[in-house]
Amino acid sequence: MSEILWAEKYRPRTLDEMVNQEDVVRRLKEFVRERNVPHLLFAGPPGTGKTTAALALAHELYGEEWRNNVLELNASDERGIQTIRERVKEYARTVALGRVPFKMIILDEADNMTSDAQQALRRIMELYTATARFCLIANYPSKIIEPIQSRCAFFRFRPLSKEDLFSRLKYIAEREGVELTEEGLDAIWEVSAGDMRRAINTLQAAAALGKVTAESVYKAVGMAKPKEVSEMINLALKGDFVNAREKLRELMINYGLSGTDIIRQVHREIFSARSSIKLPDDVRVEVADLVGEIDYRMVEGSDDEIQLSAFLAKLVLIGKRLRESTRSAI
Amino acid sequence: MSVNVPWAEKYRPRRLVEIVGNKKAISTLMTWLKSWEKGIPNKRAVLLYGPPGVGKTTLVHVIANELGYELIELNASDIRRAEELERVIARALNTSSLFGTKGRIIFFDEIDGMSGTEDQGGLAKIVDIIERTRIPVIMAANDPWDPKFRTLRNLSLVIRLNRLRVHEVMRILGRICMSEGIKADPAALKAIATMAEGDLRSAINDLQAVAQGRKFLTLEDVQGLGRRIREYDVFTVLKMLFSARTAEEAKAVLSRSAIDYDMLIQWIHENLPYQYKDPEELWKAYDALSRADVYFGRIRRTQNWSLLSYALDLATAGVAMARKHPYHFVKYQFPKRLLMLSRAKSARQLREAICKRIARQIHVSKRYANAEIIPLLKVIFEANPMMGAKIAKALDLNKDMIDLITGDERCTKAILKNMRQIEEEKEEGERKPFSPLFT
């Protein structure tokens, strides 16, 4: 007996099963009936059903044959022009099998594609319309170049309502024999911010601890966070740069986290109500600005560790200033 | 390009006619490359060897450029890029099989920089690539006679690049002085050229060290400095940088450094907190280094190398000018990150394998799998071994993978025990196909 994660186990397999996004679902079902699909662009926040809708659409179009007719790529992992030129182009140019005359290429997280890759894609989309349809999925559609946007039917996925999310969580809890309290639901809502996948993952982690209450939800979330993030920030604020940088290296090298992953977690940590980091609010704002600046420099720059070390060096300075101001206040 | 770029870089030949010396070696290499147009030749790889600074890397770049090849370059001594070897090459080979063999060259530079133990797999991989390749492979090394290169030597056409002659080096130095507006005494150039012992790069660095910013260069200028103007080791370079009193002094260290600038930046990064104890200084220096890195990022993306001088200004003068207090000597450390990276290599590969499985099964990116799902699995594995065991089975995780996720031996054992239990129950179920409930 084996079991995949609940977020996958309870992923809707058909368009009818999708409880939210009625407008999107209605239009997609029309495509299935006509057996004709334009290029698609699904945009919306994480965990709102974009990937699910793409997979369900593929299921309904191709039935049992779907695996032979769908190429699924995640552009975060394969974001370069090479992938587009090689895998996508080769796949797009060959003829579809079965009753539908075209194949489908799902490009998840397409907003992470480099602009070169997008330029290459734009040509491929036109060259192979006879044999392939693209479904691009993005959190931020503005990062998709305009020529591609204009070639796609645009679908906006709305954030999930609290009711939709809760009813799904309750359904899963019931099926899994998990006790779920109202406070537990509220806590999951708070940490997941309307992201269904994160919500179900959080539910499962809390359920692993037992009954799902606000307490177990926060405990599970706390356990999932690498403790090195808050340790790193606190060490830097205390003035211990060398050990703070050591923690940074553990996060990057041992946990395999990217600079962007880390700076996001730092940001969450600085503003989290349950954080161990004690800072006056005006300093929090100052640090948030710094976090943003470093995030930007990482996007522009080439060495995340140097950028994050610069961040830590500034924290050391802020920590020193804070100590001096408390001392002079006394 | 402005004056701050190392001259060795500024005057690196871009075209074949600009390359001096080694005519025979160059024509052998050209003939071999052209033979690929008629099909895969007997030897699929070339091993270029010769002492430092005779132009191995430059030659490969220039020839590729002139014959219209795209270079897929792997600097094999660079630990940071070692893991990319497999991925980059696989990609290059795939492309060629799709679009024919013309168009690309795989170039492994500095293969004797590979460590015997750490990168053993790396050398074997290169051998493997040469045996399968359908595009030209070129390697460069200083000393290819180490026994560990025997297989590589046998598979390759070995081409030697000789030390440059004194008059060849002099000719280049003279050309540089002309473009820099320096009137140089030929005797001075001859002294530098002789001292360089056929290493053109170091000759150019030496020239820059004594002649930059001057109108005239005499024999005295050169003799006074003697052999000491050869490249300095990294410890001396760091000391010169951190004790520099002017921006110009700080910038000058680059032309005297025995290691290239991206490695030097790793050394600076490592040693900043030991050199700068004052938080004010530390932040100022890191801010400069961080801005330098932004330029490096832009250069990498746009290939606009004219930005290099700004990056180097910030990385040297920017870092040095952060100093408020008098220079104090510190014992400089080797960049620890490079050690950590090479030690964590196998764990990284294991993590990558786990992420790949998760990504495929639940339709997320590998990055998301690493940042979001692995921590979730850790919680489940710790709190609920039975639930964990079921997931571990679904993802087909082995003991090492489970261990990497839990980071705790006891927890791993609990998961494995539960996995065995599931296995036994399954077998039991298979033996008795009817559940007792229905009898």
Image (cartoon, rainbow, N blue to C red):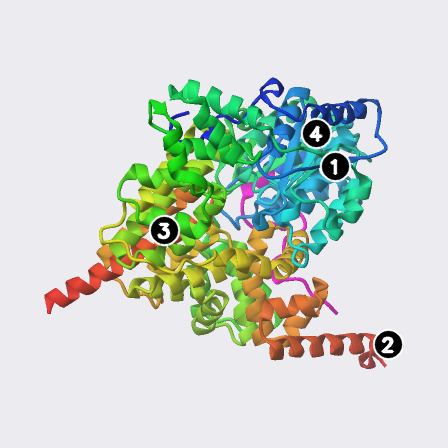
Give the mark nearest the N terminus, 3 or 2. 3
Residue A21 is inside the magenta segment? yes
Q: Which mark is residue B239?
A: 3
Residue B314 is inside the magenta segment? no
Residue wearing tag 1: B93
* Image mark 1: chain: B
Give the mark nearest the N terminus, 1 or 4. 1
* Image mark 4: chain: B
Observer-nearest of B284 and B422: B284
Q: Give the magenta part as a residue range.
A: A1-26
Q: Amino acid at mark 1?
A: Leu
* Image mark 2: chain: B
Q: Is B377 displayed left or right of A239 in the figure?
A: right
Q: Quarter holding the N terminus of chain B?
A: top left
Residue depicted at x 57% and y 68%: B378
Marks 1 & 4 on one chain? yes
Alpha-carbon distance for marks 4 and 2? 63 Å
Residue wearing tag 4: B104
Q: Amino acid at mark 3?
A: Lys
Residue B20, quarter of picture: top right
Marks 3 & 2 on one chain? yes
Residue depicted at x 47% and y 57%: B334
Give the mark nearest the N terminus, 3 or 4. 4
User: In front: mark 2 or mark 1?
Assistant: 1
Residue wearing tag 2: B434
Give the mark nearest the N terminus, 1 or 3. 1
Q: Amino acid at mark 2?
A: Phe
Q: Position of residue A175 (x, y in %)?
A: 63, 67
Task: Kindly indicate whether the residue at mark 2 contacts the one at mark 3 (C-beta within 8 angstroms).
Answer: no
